Image (cartoon, rainbow, N blue to C red):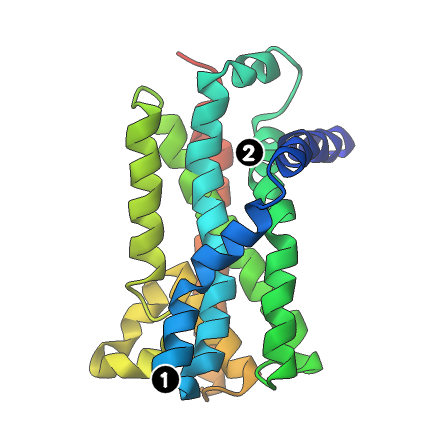
């Protein structure tokens, strides 16, 4: 276990620090992309800025999760970095977690920045920070696991194809479900938010930040579903992901 954790952090540092040194503007770009809907919300519907801030933070962890699992692993295979790591006594879980954590390290300042804005605007409180971190972590873990599985089972696809797939999945899982907007806007179809880890996480954060209300039964159901999706994602990553080429 100690070696697994150590290898994970070594891979994460190896993947994140060089990229940050080469492209320091990456932090700004990641934040701006996720904040694009927030700008429109601020212009046309100032009463939903709180919803938009929550959506922005969810968007950042979800995008980096799915993109790291698909694009980074594909790029490692393309430039032969993966072959080098495969030749070492590295557990596939260390590799998957290291790849997933690397972009999280790079984007963490952006997430903290939007969290501070939400705190200053009264959207978040000290009592809701722990719930915010928990929901964001589960969302990131589930999306990373999904991306890793896709990249390993579609290893014969071109980097261009996988990059487009990553973008489409990110759009489909972030901008279509109620992430930037309240699920109440869906009316009788609000249950759809339970089906996606992105919208489910956003719904939980809204409850703990006071933007919406929910009885304890539905709140417990949301946590159970989010934890279950994350657990299944991780289990499938460990058990089914193809580590070495056939």
**Residue 241 visible within the image:** yes
Name the residue rendered at 66%, 31% in the picture. Answer: 18
Question: In the displayed structure, does residue 130 sit left or right of residue 54?
Answer: right
Name the residue rendered at 35%, 68% in the picture. Answer: 194
Between label 2 and label 1, give the one nearer the viewer. Answer: 1
Residue 109 sits above or below residue 65 on the image: below
Q: Residue furthest left?
A: 188
How many residues crowd mark 1 within 10 Å: few (<14), some (14–19), many (20+)?
Answer: few
Name the residue rendered at 67%, 29% in the picture. Answer: 14
Q: Earlier in the sequence, mark 2 or mark 1?
A: 1
Residue 6 sits above or below residue 181 on the image: above
Q: Which residue is mark 1?
A: 45
Name the residue rendered at 42%, 40% in the picture. Answer: 147
**SS class of the residue under badge 1?**
loop
Q: Position of residue 31 (x, y in %)?
A: 52, 57
Name the image quarter holding residue 22. Answer: top right
Q: Which residue is mark 2?
A: 96
- Mark identifier at residue 30: none
Q: Position of residue 71 (x, y in %)?
A: 43, 33
Q: Quadrant of the C terminus?
A: top left
Question: In the displayed structure, does residue 28 sit left or right of residue 5?
Answer: left
Question: In the displayed structure, does residue 222 sit left or right of residue 159?
Answer: right
How many residues crowd mark 2 within 10 Å: few (<14), some (14–19), many (20+)?
Answer: many
Alpha carbons under labels 2 and 1: distance apart: 40 Å
**SS class of the residue under badge 2?**
helix
Q: Are marks 2 and 1 in contact (CB under 8 Å)?
A: no
Task: Decide which of 222, 197 is in the foreground and name it.
Answer: 197
Residue 79 sits above or below residue 113 on the image: above
Q: Position of residue 48 (x, y in %)?
A: 41, 83
Q: Position of residue 196 (x, y in %)?
A: 36, 61
């Amino acid at each position: 276990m100690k070696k697994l954790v150590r290898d994970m952090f070594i891979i994460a540092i190896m993947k994140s620090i060089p990229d940050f040194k080469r492209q320091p503007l990456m932090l700004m770009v990641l934040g701006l992309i996720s904040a694009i809907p927030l700008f429109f919300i601020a212009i046309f519907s100032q009463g939903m800025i709180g919803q938009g801030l929550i959506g922005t933070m969810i968007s950042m962890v979800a995008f980096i999760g799915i993109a790291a699992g698909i694009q980074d692993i594909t790029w490692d295979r393309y430039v032969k970095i993966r072959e080098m790591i495969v030749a070492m006594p590295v557990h596939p879980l260390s590799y998957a977690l290291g790849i997933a954590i690397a972009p999280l390290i790079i984007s963490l300042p952006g997430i903290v920045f939007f969290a501070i804005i939400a705190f200053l605007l009264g959207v978040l409180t000290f009592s809701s920070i722990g719930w915010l971190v928990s929901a964001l972590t589960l969302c990131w873990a589930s999306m990373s696991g999904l991306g890793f599985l896709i990249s390993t089972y579609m290893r014969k696809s071109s980097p261009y194809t996988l990059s487009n797939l990553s973008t489409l999945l990110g759009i489909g899982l972030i901008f279509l479900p109620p992430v930037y907007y309240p699920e109440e806007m869906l009316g009788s179809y609000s249950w759809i938010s339970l089906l996606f880890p992105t919208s489910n996480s956003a719904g939980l954060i809204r409850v703990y930040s006071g933007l919406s209300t929910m009885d304890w039964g539905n709140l417990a159901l949301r946590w159970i579903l989010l934890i279950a999706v994350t657990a299944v994602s991780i289990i499938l990553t460990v058990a089914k992901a193809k580590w070495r080429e056939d």
